[in-house]
Image (cartoon, rainbow, N blue to C red):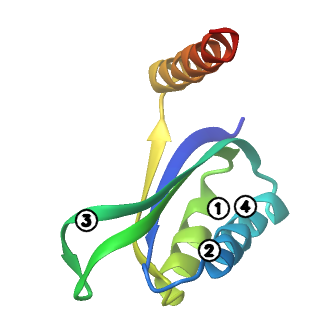
């Protein structure tokens, strides 16, 4: 059974919106081409970094939650290292409690959105 992972990566702020989405789509394609199911994704947008990376103070953050076989992670992380648009990345294996927590968080966010539409 595939494990569930959460991957966050930071792209250089010099990219246009289109270039940023091209980069995201490249990594999503690597995941899906290798048998992953993307559970959730979230574009956090341009954010200030806690400390400069490559002399830059901001970066585009993107989160992807997916189910995949463990051997795929090394392959994706190698691609992150090769891509000059990626400044940092982090992949975390989620245990059953983290998966449940993320699902609950998404459900609450969806309910909140529905309430805002009604109000």
Badge nearest the viewer, 2 or 4:
2
Badge nearest the viewer, 1 or 4:
4
Disc 3 crowd rating (10 Å Cα; few below 14, some 14-19, many 20+) is: some
Question: Which badge, 2 or 1, comes first in the chain's sequence?
Answer: 2
92 to 71, vertically: above or below: above
Residue 26 drawn at (x, y percent): 72, 74
Question: Which badge, 2 or 4, comes first in the chain's sequence?
Answer: 2
Question: Which badge, 4 or 3, comes first in the chain's sequence?
Answer: 4
Indicate the quadrant where residue 58 lies. Answer: bottom left
Q: In the rendered image, which residue does mark 3 sit on?
A: 49
Indicate the quadrant where residue 107 lies. Answer: top right
Q: Residue at x 54, y 68 (%)?
A: 74
Can residue 53 be seen in the rendering of this structure?
A: yes
Question: Which badge, 3 or 1, comes first in the chain's sequence?
Answer: 3
Q: In the rendered image, which residue does mark 2 sit on?
A: 17
Q: Residue at x 57, y 61 (%)?
A: 73
Q: Residue at x 52, y 45 (%)?
A: 6
Badge nearest the viewer, 2 or 3:
2
Residue at mark 3 to residue at mark 1: CA–CA distance: 28 Å
Q: Judge by depth and name the residue closer to the eye, 23 or 30.
A: 23
Q: In the rendered image, which residue does mark 1 sit on?
A: 72
């Amino acid at each position: 059974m595939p494990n569930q992972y959460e991957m966050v990566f930071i792209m250089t702020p010099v990219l246009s919106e289109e270039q940023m989405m091209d980069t995201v789509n490249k990594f999503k394609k690597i995941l899906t081409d290798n048998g992953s199911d993307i559970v959730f994704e979230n574009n956090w947008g341009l954010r200030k970094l806690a400390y400069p990376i490559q002399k830059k103070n901001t970066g585009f953050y993107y989160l992807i939650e997916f189910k995949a076989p463990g051997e795929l992670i090394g392959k994706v992380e190698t691609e992150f290292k090769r891509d000059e648009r990626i400044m940092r990345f982090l992949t975390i294996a989620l245990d059953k409690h983290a998966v449940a927590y993320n699902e609950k968080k998404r459900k609450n966010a969806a309910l909140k959105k529905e309430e805002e539409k009604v109000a």
